[in-house]
Every structure is written in structure tokens, then in C-alpha cells.
Amino acid sequence: LANGADSRDLAAFAILRRQQSESDQIPTQSPVALSGASGANLGLARRAQGLGEDRAWVVPGKGTVCLIAEWPRRHAGGADCVPDAAAAAGQLVGASGTASAPGIEFIAGLVPDGVQTVSFHLRGRGVTSAAVREGVYMIALAGSASSITYAGPHGQVRIEGVGLPIG
């Protein structure tokens, strides 16, 4: 398990630099889990504030950063980890769906400091956006996203293939 966030992660994500508080703890009844392979230390988690009833935690691992996302009202959620460099490049993106909400795609991700808004390019149906809170964005889309774009600290970023597989 990681015993702290890596310096690269601390540089990219203010949420990991702030003091941990009691509200950062992941509830023991959380339905989402991470595998031990990531080296994620749930005791180091930081909960993103400002997401309304949705919940997300950024969790440092050994050479990785993880994101746990929950949409309690929709009984949906997911978790994913990527290497530090990929996280700093905005590539920590997870998509999930649930039988209780057919046709809805739940997307959560982590972007580096300074990003205010993320745009989702929907397959054949235009663009929508979501605000970023403490580096985290979450959205429930009616349909499927093909890519995400945002203005990052080093210019425009486009991430392809973010939605659930079609078919």
C-alpha cells in the first residue's frame, strides 16, 4: 500500500495536498472496491467536495492514482486506477452503466489543477459539459460519450474512447 501521495500527484492535484478530514473517509458500506494490485491506500482518500449527492474519492496508490465514484440515487458506481503520468494527463476516466438506468452512461474522471469544465462529445448527438470540483467531474449522460475535451494547464486535451462499448 502507498504510504502517501507521490510528488507528481501532489503537484498535479490540489485535492491530495489539502489536509485530510473526517469527511474524506470512504464509508464502510460503500459498494465500490479497489483491488490491492493498485497499491491504493483507502486511508489516504480525499473526497471531492461540491458534487451534490454524488460522491467521489481520489486515492493515491503506488505509482498510481485511483478514483472511486458513486451515484447513490442511481445505485451506480465504479473505480479505476491509472499510472501517475496518465492521471496527470487527465486519463483517469471511468464509465459505467446499470440495469436500473438503461441508456444512461455514468462517467467520472480526474483532471489536473486549473481545469474548470470538461466537455463530453456524444455519439451523434452534440456536446454537453460538466463542472470540475476539486479536480473531479461526474455526469450521468443520456446516451454515450465518444470523447472528452478540456483546456488543461498545457493546452487543449482530447481523450478518445471514454464511453461504454456499443453493442
Image (cartoon, rainbow, N blue to C red):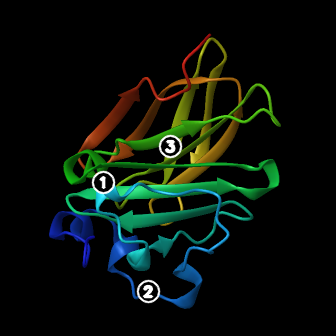
Say few, some or many: other residues with alpha carbon within 10 Å of mark 2 (under 14 / 14 to 19 / 20 or more). Answer: some
Quarter occupied by residue 38: bottom left
Secondary structure, mark 1, is helix
* Looking at the image, residue 60 lies above or below residue 79: below
Residue of label 2: 20
Give yes or no for contact between labels 1 and 3 (Cβ–Cβ under 8 Å).
no
| Quadrant containing the C terminus in the rendered view | top right
Tell me, yes or no, whether the two marked residues, 2 and 1, touch with CB atoms within 8 Å.
no
Q: In this view, does 61 lie to the left or right of 111?
A: left
Q: Earlier in the sequence, mark 2 or mark 1?
A: 2
Mark 1 or 3, nearer chain start: 1
Q: In this view, does 104 lie above or below 150?
A: above
The residue sitting at 59% across, 83% down in the picture is: 23
Q: Distance between the residues labelled 2 and 3?
A: 26 Å
Residue type at tag 3: Val
| Mark 2 residue element | loop
Q: Mark 1 points at which residue?
A: 37
Q: Where is residue 30 in the image (x, y as percent from the top left)?
A: 64, 65
**Mark 2: amino acid:** Gln
> Split into 4 quadrants, where in the image is the N terminus?
bottom left
Identify the residue at the far front of this view: 36
Instruction: Say what secondary structure mark 3 lies in.
Output: strand
